[in-house]
Amino acid sequence: TVNADPSPPPAPDIPGYDIFAILGIFSIMTISIIVVMKRKKN
């Protein structure tokens, strides 16, 4: 596999990078909590 950009983008230089990372983690956590709550209700 050929990587066009082998080095990961630096987080400090890109303000939106941290925001998207936090939103992604937060959305995964909320979805997992909703799934657990639905399983407990049934």
Image (cartoon, helix red, strand yellow):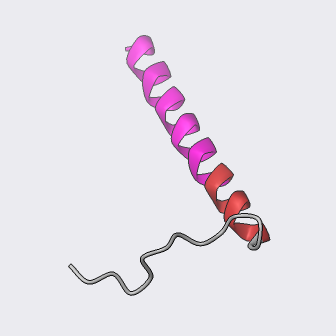
Vertically, is 42 above or below 28?
above
Check the image and name the residue furthest to the left. Answer: 1
* Image: magenta residue range: 23-42
Verify whether residue 36 appears in magenta: yes
Picture quarter containing residue 18?
Answer: bottom right
Left or right: 37 in relation to 11: left
Check the image and name the residue furthest to the bottom. Answer: 4
Left or right: 16 in relation to 2: right
Vertically, is 4 above or below 28?
below
Identify the residue at horizontal 44%, vertical 22% (top origin). Answer: 36
Identify the residue at horizontal 49%, vertical 73% (top origin). Answer: 7
Check the image and name the residue furthest to the front. Answer: 7
Identify the residue at horizontal 43%, vertical 29% (top origin). Answer: 35
Picture quarter containing residue 30?
Answer: top right
Verify whether residue 6 appears in magenta: no
Assign the C terminus to one quadrant of the image.
Answer: top left
Assign the N terminus to one quadrant of the image.
Answer: bottom left
Q: Position of residue 39 (x, y in %)?
A: 38, 19
Identify the residue at horizontal 52%, vertical 42% (top origin). Answer: 28
Query: Which secondary structure is most common in the magenta stretch?
Result: helix
Pick the residue in front: 20 or 12.
Answer: 12
Vertically, is 33 above or below 28?
above
Picture quarter containing residue 14?
Answer: bottom right
The number of numbered discs placed on residues in the rendered structure image is 0
Vertically, is 11 above or below 33?
below
Pick the residue in front: 27 or 10.
Answer: 10
Q: Position of residue 4 (x, y in %)?
A: 38, 87
